[in-house]
Amino acid sequence: MLTLFANMFREEWRMHSTLFGSLNFALFPVLIFAIAFMGTFILPLISNVMDVMLLSITVHAQFVLLGIMVGSFGIMGKEVMNRRFGQGSLIAYSARSLPVSERIVFLNFVVKDIVYYFILWILPFGLGFLAASPFNGIGIQYPLLLLLTMSIGFLFGLCTIFLLSAIYSRSKPALFAVLAAIIVAFLAAGTMYSPETILSALILPVLLFNSFTISGLVFTICIIAILFALSIAFFTPADTGSEKHYRNMLDSFSQRLGFLKENTLVAKDFIDLYRSGIGVGQIIFSFILPLGLIWLILSFLTGFITQDNILFTIAVVTGIIASTMYTWLTEFDSISVYYFLPLNISSVIRAKVGTFTVLQAVPVIFLVAVGLLSGDPGSIPNAVVLCLSISFFELALMIRMCGLQPGTMIYNVKVFLTYILVTGPVILVLLGLTFVSTYLAYFSVILFIPAWLLIKSGFKKWDSADYAGF
């Protein structure tokens, strides 16, 4: 098992270093370290305007969300394990031809991903805080404890979504029953406990960080271990013995999408999403659940920010997460299969943009629901415009910088740094404007101009590039 893990770990390194060089990949955790190191120096300023408890919840919530965003192995795992002779020839893709059980292969795949995320994100962030703490008069015990509780928070979010996605892969009604039970439990808890108590219980590592005890640590680790063990037990790596038959949908579907230039490729994308089950699963686990959790947390902060500000903060976050739909469409669609067709790379990317545009109905529906449930229907148009402007702007950046490999290229330190430096100020300015007046959200439509220019230059760039593959 250790040999299998080591080989998977090695191939992950080779996959990234082949695409953009070993140095660029190795510098990624250094960049996270630098961001955390510099961020520590503005903690005194932040603590003047934000309660320490809320700051603790915010930091831990980010790592719980990171775990939630990457933890849908129950959905993604089946796709990975069934690509027996996939283009990348990864070990996990060859699960059925190896003299090892599929469950062992999948267990190694999940653990390898967890270790990689720890090395790339969590450890450098914790070490950056640790290195800067002496300069800010912070005791060494706090960064060490934060590193521990951040790691636990990441694992808690990851294992929770892993279990829910594994249940989903087995029985969709069972998943909806579990989610209904969770919602009822929170509504009942809301009548008995304060918002801060519920948030602390929801994010267990916060409790551990604020009042650390050995028994509390053991209890939290046991919960995570149970969630992980149940996830592995529920996961079904393959459809055993069953055959699925589908009628030809391409012609009729492409005719319905005839208003799009690359309608046949867009129809193919939607058929892929439908037949693989990825589409519905991703909407639930990579969109609705993370945004629902963020909305829940922000709703408990109404004493600190107004209802309008909550709606527009949700709109900004929805725009950012909605832009990741582009990675859904490209993650398992290798460019090599298109080399046999008379197509330019720009035609494939243009088709992905068409599919992405149709999928933007999902964030619009979500924001309309949030606006209505918040009792603020008048601000819905402004929030939708803000969300879509950010989503398409970030899509354009991904196309310009990453082409058809956004999920992998984001670990190129140049790409990641450029992404942060470009999007960070834009988002802060737009959010600040909406705090002044909600009508200033319409100012965000100006983003469609650079978005159009970036997409156009992205087409030229990738058509003339020797596309890197592996």
Image (cartoon, rainbow, N blue to C red):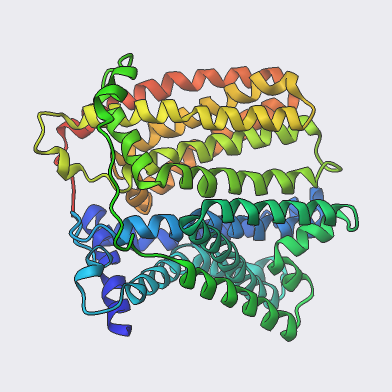
Residue at the (73%, 66%) spot, across then down: 206
Total numbered circles: 0
Q: Nearer the viewer, residue 205 or 21?
A: 205
Place of residue 217 in the rendered image (x, y in percent of width and height, measured from the top left): 69, 80
User: Which part of the image, by quadrant, shows the C terminus?
Assistant: bottom left
Considering only vertical position in the picture, is 89 above or below 383?
below
Place of residue 255 in the rendered image (x, y in percent of width and height, measured from the top left): 29, 18
327 horizontally vs 246: left or right: right
Considering only vertical position in the picture, is 43 above or below 443?
below
Residue at the (83%, 43%) spot, across then down: 304
Place of residue 309 in the rendered image (x, y in percent of width and height, measured from the top left): 74, 33
313 horizontally vs 402: left or right: right
Q: Is residue 462 visible?
A: yes
In the rendered image, the residue lying farthest to the right is 192
Q: Nearer the viewer, residue 341 or 180?
A: 180
Q: Is residue 429 visible?
A: no
Residue at the (33%, 49%) spot, across then down: 409
Place of residue 259 in the rendered image (x, y in percent of width and height, measured from the top left): 33, 14
Q: Nearer the viewer, residue 42 or 431?
A: 431
Name which quarter of the figure residue 308 lies in: top right
User: Which part of the image, by quadrant, shows the N terminus?
Assistant: bottom left
In the rendered image, the residue lying farthest to the top is 259
